[in-house]
Image (spheres, rainbow, N blue to C red):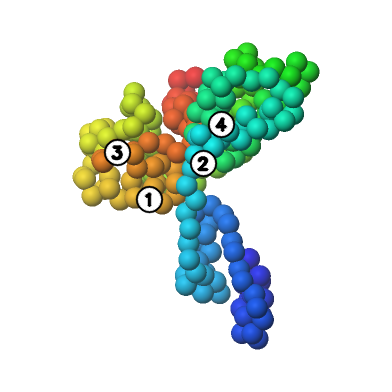
Amino acid sequence: MKDFARCYQLLNRQGYPIALMIAGLSENISELKNENITSFLLRGKRIALSALNLSQVEASYSKVFKESGYQVSKKILEKMALMTMGYSYAFQLLGYLVLKAAKKSKVIDQNTLECIKSEYLLVLKQNVYTKVLSSLSKQDRKFVLAMAQSPKHCVSIKEIHERLNRPSNFVANYRRRLLDDQVIKSTNYGEVAFTLPFFKEYVLRQYRFEQGLE
């Protein structure tokens, strides 16, 4: 990336009509911007992509399945959209697994979802969640564990503060870090939730594993 940046700057200085667009994980983009050779990226506009709209996810699944000759009900489409939580990789992965599982019968139902769920979670864990969790600092992990231990989907900052038993500014700092990394999202005032589907379950299971409880 550094060599690429040097090449880009050279072509830019020579007046070539060139533009640069980069997509990547938030932490990797931030790291790249902080390099001396790529500091010019700080002047660029940064766009944080939001989660996919669940209604659009449902509509996309419906279009692809029906055009491919698959039978699927609206209720199942709604369940599939919820299973992705608008996460683009999960949207692609779930669609692929469902199409593959129902290839012979051409019928997508609750049984199909149950059959592919374990593989769906396994691939999310291997390809995304292991990396996400390992890249977090020790205090970041304590924050997400405190969130995961709540029975609620949307967790209040007050509850996290009580679980961590740390000063308010400490909680606010790690909340901001995790928001920037798009691990969590702000929901209602003073509340946060995980952005990734089934990430809460993964965090809890990983914690039990590390504590020797499984």
Q: Are marks 2 and 1 in contact (CB under 8 Å)?
A: no
Q: Which label lies toward us, 2 or 4?
A: 4
In this picture, residue 202 sits left or right of residue 71? left
State the residue position of label 3: 188
Residue at image location 30% in from the left, 50% down from the top: 173
x%, y% of residue 2?
62, 69
For residue 139, above or below residue 119? below
Q: Nearer the viewer, mark 2 or mark 1?
A: 2
Q: Earlier in the sequence, mark 3 or mark 2?
A: 2
Q: How many marks?
A: 4
82 relative position to 190: left or right: right
Q: Is residue 130 visible?
A: no
Element type at marker 2?
A: loop
Mark 2 neighbour class, 10 Å CA radius: few under 14, some 14 to 19, many 20 or more: some
Q: CA distance from mark 3 to mark 2?
A: 19 Å
Which of these two is toward me, 161 or 26?
26
Q: Are marks 4 and 1 in contact (CB under 8 Å)?
A: no
Single out the mark in the foreground, 1 or 3. Answer: 3
Residue extending farthest right: 104
Quote the CA–CA distance across marks 2 and 1.
22 Å
Query: The disc labelled 1 sits on which kind of residue?
Result: Arg
Q: Earlier in the sequence, mark 2 or mark 4?
A: 2
Residue under numbered circle 2: 52
Residue 184 percent across, percent down from the top left: 40, 41
